[in-house]
Amino acid sequence: MKKTKLIYHTFLNRFFLLTIIFASISFYGQNAKIINGSEKTIKKHSIYDNTLEAPVPQGMVDENSPWLHFRIPLNKNELGHRLYYFKLSQDSTFTKDVIRSKAKRWSFFNPYSVLKKGNWYWQYGYTLDTTPADIKWSNDKYSFVITGNERVVVPPTPDEVIKRISSTKAPHVVLLKDEIGNLLPSSQPEIKEGILNNYKKLLNIRPEVKVVVDESTYPNLLKEDYENKKFRFFQLSTLKQFKGFANRIESLLKAYLLTGNEEYKRIGLEDFYKLDNEFHTVMMEYGKHPGYPDDFVLEAHIKLMTLILDAFSEDLNKEWKTKIVNLLFKYKKEGYLNFYKQLEFSEHIAYKAHLWQAGVQTLLMSAIVLSPYKEEAQLWLEYAYELWLYRNPAGSRNDGGWHGGNGYFGTNERQLLYTPWVMSKLMGYDYFNHPWYRNVAKYLSYSNPVGNPGLAFGDGNGTDGAGHYNLVEALAHIHADNYWNKWRLKTTGRIDKKWFINKVGENEAPWSLLSVWNTNKLDPDFIKVDQPKELSALFRDIGYVGMHTDLVNPSKNLLLNFRSCPFGQLNHAHPAQNAFNIAYGGEPLFWRTGHYNSIDKHKVYSFKHSRAHNTILANGFGQSTDISGYGWVPRFVTGRKISYTVGDASNAYSGIYRVQSSKKSYLEKEGISVTEANGYGNPEVTRFRRHIAMLRPNHIIVYDELEAKEPIHWTFKLNAQDNMEQIGDNKLSTSNAHARANAQLLCENTVETMVTDKFFSGSALDWRGRQGNGAKNYPNQWHGSFTTTDKLKSTRFLTIIEILPNGEEVSTKVDVIQTKNFTVAEVGDYKVKVELDPNRPSFIEIVSNDETCALVSGQNAKKVELGKNIKTAKLIGNTLFMEKSDTGKIDFFEQSDILPDVLKFGNKY
């Protein structure tokens, strides 16, 4: 093992990142992709740059016109004083037909025009605003190619947006002027009546606007704990109260906009003035920096001030209008995720959750509202608008997925719907016309089908996932011809009326729906849309595969979720590359474990660690909690009986771990130690390719290829939330109310099987009271492991998982035969043949007993046979798949490794 090196450093002055580097420095400079026959091996520190390292785009692009982007690290005191320039031409000497940018404060640029076919060359320049004539142009010229096959994207320019705002009367954000009094949904009388009844209750019940800090509410189980946790407890308590008042005020003001009743406006503004006092007194005591409240408190207040200045400026006296303008300006210039904190940061980093949950949206919306009052806000508007155009939706590229998992995907619904809808109305341009928006309903249909547990590869409770009901319904209206929008809406049903009525006044997503309903018609035949033809789908940008047996009836559905993500582990994502989860009947079976809480020992050791997921521990070490701990999905084929994919997590064990906390002392007091003994280290893994197949109706096959530089222990992790037992040598079993799942692992080497219902971190303390008053600990969960007895440089695992639905006659026979060269298993209606000797080329063959489908894959795949039909591989090692249709036609598919688009196209985002 490499000697560990411990480094502490700060990040954004908000977190300490505890970073342990186990990898050698020589690893980081390797950026080449090495192609070996059918397989492609990515030799990069990370697929996405944590911070942009080289100018983009270069090479092929898939949109026209692409964004040009570079980064020059700032010197001291240069933030906000840099000027950037771009020139772009099909003439490499830049002497004719040159597109030139104006001086920009940020280093990304779009020409906002359709570029002609051919090679395009570009350069960048930069200087300081104190010496504007002294432009330093890049020595290198960069180039990309326009083929004519790119997606054409030419949105309105920032100047056009500013002109529209200045030439029209407010409001521009919460709604447009001609929408005032016209958004109550007459076509849905039940919702209309419910909204009006709720608003009447706001007039009848008027609580005192006062945030209370009650020491007696501090839980008894935490009485002996230290001040950090107590501070956090009351920080959350006061935040909840403040947001409750803010939501009520927002509802009152929006009630006026819908009804015209002056009483709502009068009470809403009066209560805002009182809440503003609480903001400047009590809430300041629970901020992270002097003179500023908690980040989420600040965002809630900014949201209210933006609403009032946008739609009620004429109702404010001069003193209050000046105060709101100045406060809003101050906080967007100096406060949480303000312009100067985003500039030279947001555009360059791969992803930051709070930026895209609220930061970019609130800066853009506030700048729209402030721009008529403050000239500097026009600069913010230009930046935020272009940043949003360039990087939205941020959680993926084009496939509709979300790299952080579905647990926190839902927190982004507001900005994913509200922002493009506000801009679409304002500018008369369809900002939803993007591949991601065309695919998101498809992604949700496979990752979180109705009645099934959702994805469990990130923060969140691991079973619900994200419905995105507002977004889906809006898209079904806006793009009514999209099949997946109609299918998703058919399966989820129209928006829940009770929820909508209760949330429309405080949540931008349902508020947006009122306007969508008013301007876009739903295809009345959406309910007649047929179910999807395919039971499995790949979303390559985020490395997710969803496999099912029944997308219509959750009580009969066998669900397999698989993840190997090019983004690595960022923010709310987990170190869960090549991990899978299995459910049946709408309930988990072999599933991720752990409970989500603010940072504590349980979260670090037993929740946000690879041991909580169904993946591989290498020498007891988890995968890296860093962008460098990435995976990807090289292959995917699917048919009626067999669905198959390959994940490559060979680079997931880079040995870099980041544990966030407000203070280093907090980690020490929690007893958190990121050491090899606790499962953190660099095992120097060189190969982890996982083949995984669903054999319908009742089996799943997992075939692992594992290699490291030095001999290590290899552990196949298998977890369950409710129960698990060992039922034989290398056999584990779990069950839910609908089925039992049995797993059997085969390996040429001796393997030790263990089961425990104890978390690695010990008991999981529910110190935030998520389970209700009086609850002390979360329930224990179950953790199984198959670990090689000896340390090995390489090994192979074959794991056969059978799912036995209650009350059904299912073939449970799994016979294993060891032949001279292969291990052969009779698995229900299939014969599975694999090579378990790690010294031989890998090989897996699956053939149905009725000879209707066959699959061959692995390094030694040469041909596939189905009865008398034989197909030879064009390239040894390709995946070969044959399936016979009901008419007797033979369908054949052949596939070698396919790289994710981020490595094929120069426009990363």
Image (tube, helix red, strand yellow):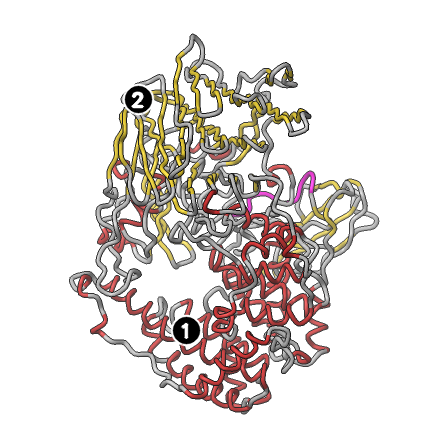
Left or right of 125: which side holds 254?
A: left
Our reading of the magenta stretch's main secondary structure is loop
**Residue 162, quarter of picture:** bottom right
Residue at horizontal 52 percent and vertical 47 percent from the top? 51
Residue at horizontal 37 percent and vertical 32 percent from the top? 616
Left or right of 390: which side holds 453?
A: left
State the image coordinates of residue 884 (x, y, percent, origin top left). 63, 26
For badge 2, the amino acid type reads: Lys
State the image coordinates of residue 802 (x, y, percent, origin top left). 40, 31
Q: Secondary structure at mark 2?
A: loop
Q: Which residues are magenta?
A: 51-61
Q: Is residue 233 visible?
A: yes
Q: Secondary structure at mark 1?
A: helix
Q: Is residue 470 above or below residue 656?
A: below
For badge 1, the amino acid type reads: Lys
Q: Is residue 376 visible?
A: no
State the image coordinates of residue 675 (x, y, percent, origin top left). 28, 39
What's the distance in space between the residues labelled 1 and 2, CA to CA? Answer: 54 Å
Residue at horizontal 28 percent and vertical 64 percent from the top? 772
How packed mark 1 is, by other alpha carbons closer than 10 Å (few <14, some 14-19, many 20 or more), is some
Using the image as rendered, state which of residue 460 and residue 685 is in the foreground: 460
Q: Which residue is mark 1?
A: 243
Q: Is residue 568 above or below residue 31?
A: below
Q: Which residue is mark 2?
A: 791
> Closer to the observer: label 1 or label 2?
1
